[in-house]
Image (spheres, helix red, strand yellow):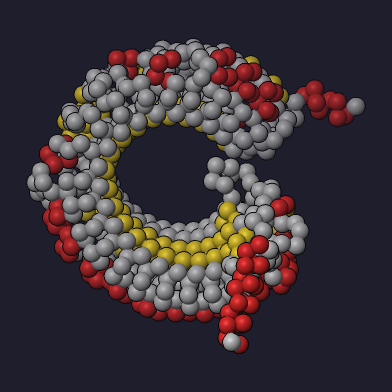
Amino acid sequence: MQLLKWVLNLLLVCSMLQVFPLPLAQTICSEADRAALLGFKAKILKDSTDSLSSWVGKDCCGGDWEGVGCNPTGRVNKLALQRPERDSTLYMKGTLSSSLGSLQFLEVLVISGMKFITGPIPESLSNLSRLKQLVLEDNSLQGNIPSGLGRLSFLQTLSLAGNHFNGVVPLSLGNLRNLVMLNLGRNSLTGSIPSSFKNLVHLQSFDLSFNLLSGFVPEILGQFHNITFIDLSNNQLSGHLPVSLFKLVTLSDLSLSHNQLTGSIPEQVGNLKSLTSLSLSHNKLIGSIPASISRLQKLWSLNLSRNGFSNPLPAISSKGVPSLLSIDLSFNNLSLGTVPNWIMDRQLSDVNLASCKLRGAFPKFRPDSLSSIDLSSNLLTGTISTHFTNMTSLQKLKLSNNQLKFDLSELKVPDGISSIDLHSNQVFGSLSSILNNRTSSFLEVIDVSNNLISGTIPEFTEGLSLKVLNIGSNKIAGQIPSSISNLIELERLDISRNQITGTIPASLGQVVKLQWLDLSINRLTGKIPTSLLGIHSLRHANFRANRLCGEIPQGRPYNIFPASTYAYNLCLCGKPLQPCKGKKQEMVQ
């Protein structure tokens, strides 16, 4: 009977709960966590991202505090503040508060791209025992990397790239056995790669590029059996390529460029069956390029430039390296004579064979895929006038330092080309064809200096994209057109060593992005117009050896350039030269 009464009472309570349900408990963030977040906010002196303006009120877990996430118990487990990629003007200015180390339940800490957050990483971050992701990249943090970070045993991602850290890479980071991604690139770290890193057996991405690291590329890299990405470029690493490196069958991207590596490429390079990109450029490697490279079925980018590789090139069949799109063998000790068939017959996008002792006529590549060609510093002869007519994808053409001889006005290039470099050849004719409206709307770089070009400088129409115009050391006459003001994107202008006459147009002062200006060794007359003071970005100028007269514009940087900038003119005066006569008399009065 008692049991029956208890069951009836229970049913009654349950029915009442259905009619009058209890209110759900609202998750309010921990007061301690809220205080820690506000401690971080207090150390940020300026926030142009406006993210922290949302940090108001008592509930940091309500979803209104930008970048803050919480677990179901109201403890902050995520703080992620990233500058929007599309707006480089946004930033935070200040330091990282040690109060961040009080967020005991934090699993994700991301503060990246803020540019002006300075100072060290607080030691207190080593207390965040639950942390899985620590990303503090692209700020201005400095000092040593705290060794205490090696205590964060759950850490899977550690990125401190793009700061000003110095000192050595802490040995303690080798304790982070769960680490999947490690990026310490773009800092000023010194010393060698720690041997303790042999413990990072789960590592998939490893980036120490753009530092000052020295010593050998360690054999322990061969123990990273899950690795897909290794970038140790732009350091001071020396010694041979470790053979263990070529056992990494999962590796897809390997860059060791810009170091001081010696020896040869081991034949075992052909074992890297997942490799898509290999860059060993700017080292001191020698010997022949191994034929086993032809076994790399997925390789699409191969850069071995600026080493000491010598003949012969491997004989690669039509089925070898079938995915290859980009090749750079420039500036080695190769004597190719002609471009090998296995390069000529492929649908490549980028071919870079500068200084490979190519001879004779310009080679006829497959026209439908090429976007970039660099055959500079070779011994090519003859004409190229019609070679590029059908290369609709061509963006960059570099054929400087050859013996090409053709009429520039007959050169046919695709409409979308952005860069033409033909300097130091025997090109003649006029500039009109490459500076016409149809071509120039996409062109950003024109360098035809040190040739035999004549005629005048054509008028510049609106809508041009030119950033570099170098027509120096030719036989160009006439005047600088006042329409030069239409080159609103121009950063570098060199018309030196020609036969240019007339005055410097005042409209040149409207080219406000100009950083380099060379008008030297011409026949220019008149004054240097004061309108040039409107070019605040100018870092280099040369007016030497003309027939200029009058006062040099008296403002920076013109009055602080060396006197040699203005030497060998008729009667220029004013700082940095002698005072003008009228000015001197005024000072006496």
Q: Which of 569 and 8 is in front in this view?
A: 8
Residue 410 versus residue 444: which sits nearer the camera?
444
Assign the C terminus to one quadrant of the image.
Answer: top right
Residue 6 placement (x, y as % from top left): 61, 82
Q: Is 119 or 15 nearer to us in this picture? A: 15
Q: Which residue lies furthest to the bottom in this view?
A: 2
Residue 161 higher or lower than 504, as above or below: below
For residue 430, which quarter of the picture? top left
557 to 119, vertically: above or below: above
Where residue 468 appears, x then y in whole percent? 47, 30
Quadrant in which the N terminus appears: bottom right
Judge whether 306 appears above or below 356 on screen: below
* Outermost residue toward the front in this view: 1
Judged from this view, the residue extending furthest toward the right is: 589
**Where residue 377 sits in the image (x, y, percent)?**
28, 38
Kindly tell me whether residue 232 is visible in this rendering: no
Rendered image quadrant of residue 204: bottom left
Residue 432, image quadrant: top left
Q: Is residue 404 left or right of residue 123?
A: left
Residue at the image position 21 percent from the left and 46 percent from the top: 323
Residue located at (37% from left, 78% from top)? 199
Q: Is residue 267 visible?
A: yes
Residue 535 is left or right of residue 455, and the answer is: right
The x, y position of residue 391, in whole percent, is 26, 26
Question: Residue visible at 63% across and 23% down?
Answer: 509
Q: Residue at x 50, y 15 (%)?
A: 460
